[in-house]
Amino acid sequence: MAAPTTAPLADRLRAIVGADAVIDDRATLLPYAYDASFWSLRQNRAPEAVVLPRTTEDVARVVRCAAETGTPIVARGAGTGQTGGAVAASGGIVIAFSRMREVIAIDRANLQAVVRPGLVFADFQDALRPHGLFFPPDPGSGRACTLGGMAANNASGPHAVRWGTTSAYVLGLEVVLADGAVIWTGGARSRALKSSSGIDLTKLFVGSEGTLGIITTLRLRVQPRPPARAVVLAAYAALEDTVRSLDDLFAAGILPSTAELLDTSAVTALQRWKPDLALPDGEAVLFVEVEGTPDHVASAVRGVDAIVRRRATVTRFAEEEAAVARLWAARSGMAAAAALAHPGKHRIFAGEDLAVPLTEIPRTIRRAREIAAELGVAVTFYGHFGDGNVHSAILVDPADPDEVRRADELADRLHRLAIEVGGTVTGEHGTGAVRSRYMRAEHGDALDVMKRIKDELDPKGILNPGKIWNEEATSRR
């Protein structure tokens, strides 16, 4: 028996983009009902149809169809998001960019590249490497996530302390608006690296999570790849000393490329997972990376080591690339390590990318530990220390309803804690459906201004509905 279909919508889409570009059978639609968020695992929000466009004009035609029929439409990259942002919360059409993944141009002399939104971050880095270039934002999901998704969520990672977030590297965008019109931001013909001309529409679309328009091409700034790097590993008896060490580095005029924090829970997890790393014991461990020319790095790593040694209980550094890569591979495996440290439990993404002032990191982690203990929920804490990004790997038995309820409460209290200490509920993963309930508390009346912009650009509300402003619906889990 043929699988059930949503024939009227699917047939109309096939007429627009071709039969091989439309998915509407239930079994094949199912993966598009989820992303990496725990929220989506409990929702099962399958779209009515998925479109796999090849060109900007394909996207524009689909959006015009959606506008005519009032059908919700959601842009999707690789589905690695952790907030439900690429899930069709209201049904409708998902536009998946797996066929639009070309590198259109790499302009080394002008430090920029033009790419399609479905290009995977790691593949882009591979394309840049022969030119001696790299794209600095470095998300943990870099082997899977797409550049369009990174721009839509203003993604980042460990290197943000020195290099900044995705927003700093988007020079211009081709965007399909809610009525199907196509515009270029940042100058229709520009290849300049900066501009003060007009309202900066590029920054408006970056981070808007597909609620204002759908990105179909990106003009990105890239940077010369540093030829060498080294890492200092430092253990501390108290969390507070990590903050003091970082301030010591700043006072010395040193801005590391990365400063990663492992709370004692993360150190314990990694020690069990990779005992051969011989991580030092302590309430916290810092990974501090420096990069540049070989001579600069050789000097800088010793300078950093001398500074952090003032407060650390033990330090060591790695200069050989193989040793550096080994340390970062261990750090990248934090999710696996956390799960292995708690047999029978699974990592869920529910409250994992708070960002707080640097001086508030110790208080935030200590308070978060207390809340987790009070609720009886297993958590591993770590983060991108250099920019205040505190991650919490919450681990639960998904088959235990009471434990899931307590995990939901923990995630809620962690988000509210971030706002309380002067931080944000999301430092790099975006708002999506999961965090819309906190937007009023974080932004106040500015949230209404955001909504006015949304209503002006998308008066029918068809672009990724149920995200960012859906305060009432997401107050219920």
Image (cartoon, rainbow, N blue to C red):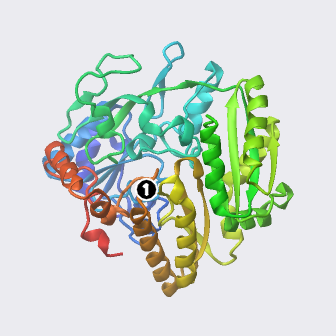
Can you tell which quarter of the image residue 232 is in? top right
Residue type highlighted by circle 1: Thr
At x 71%, y 47%, the residue is 328
Q: As rendered, which of 372 and 310 lies closer to the eye?
A: 310
Residue, far top: 109
Residue highlighted by disc 1: 426
Residue 373: give x, y in percent of width and height: 58, 81
Can you tell which quarter of the image residue 320 is in? top right
Residue 172: give x, y in percent of width and height: 35, 27
Q: As rendered, which of 207 and 285 lies closer to the eye?
A: 285
Which type of secondary structure does the marked residue at label 1 adopt?
loop
Q: Is residue 287 above or below residue 415?
A: above
So how many labels did they put on this image? 1
Q: Quadrant of the N terminus?
A: bottom left
Q: As rendered, which of 197 and 140 lies closer to the eye?
A: 197
Q: Quadrant of the C terminus?
A: bottom left
Horizontal side, residue 383 vs residue 419: left or right:
right
Q: Can see residue 335?
A: no
Can you tell which quarter of the image residue 42 is in? bottom left
Horizontal side, residue 310 vs residue 422: left or right:
right
Label 1 environment density (alpha carbons within 10 Å; few <14, some 14–19, many ≥20): many
Residue 418: give x, y in percent of width and height: 44, 63
Residue, far bottom: 402
At x 49%, y 38%, the residue is 164
Q: Is residue 434 above or below residue 321?
A: below
Q: Is residue 402 above or below residue 385?
A: below
Residue 48: give x, y in percent of width and height: 30, 58
At x 26%, y 36%, the residue is 176
Horizontal side, residue 442 vs residue 273: left or right:
left
Q: Can see residue 346?
A: yes
At x 23%, y 42%, the residue is 63
